[in-house]
Image: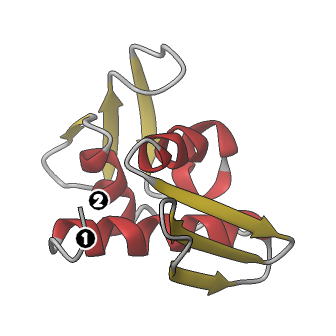
Amino acid sequence: MTKEPITENDRLIAEFMGLRIDSFPDKSDWWFVDAPNNFDSIYHNENESLFSSDYNWLMPVVEKIEKMDYGFKMCRKVVEVYIDSTKETIIKTKESCRIDSLYKAVVEFIKLHNEQKFK
């Protein structure tokens, strides 16, 4: 897993999770306040993407999605998101490793959710 610069995808996930995001005026560094795992605040700089590199950050997002009647299937490099009640696959991703695939699936889900493609 290579470190990626902080992206709009991280901001998208943070907003979905209800995290308050503060930034410095030059927008090069970010603070997530009221972060997962009971941290009061987490420094997040431009050289690191916590959601795409740390399961401790990504799994609470997965759990929130699962509470919305969706499920995840994970197998090495492939991740599928499906509607729990019908088992219909709505997102399928394949990347170089599981966390990359899961991160991409979560981002795709949130984008579709925000577009009101599904509830």
Task: Return the mark for residue 95.
Answer: none
Q: CA distance from mark 1 to mark 2?
A: 17 Å
> Residue at position x 44%, y 57% from top?
46
The answer to whether residue 31 of the structure is visible from this angle is yes
Residue 96, position in %: x, y? 78, 82
Location of the N terminus (image quadrant): bottom right
Q: Is residue 78 above or below residue 3?
A: below
Question: Tag 2 or tag 1, which sits nearer the N-term?
Answer: 2
Quadrant of the rendered image containing residue 101 = bottom right
Q: Amino acid at mark 1?
A: Phe
Residue 67, position in %: x, y? 43, 41
Q: Which residue is mark 2?
A: 12
Q: Amino acid at mark 2?
A: Leu
- Mark 2 falls on what kind of element? helix
The answer to whether residue 48 of the structure is visible from this angle is no
Q: Which residue is mark 1?
A: 118
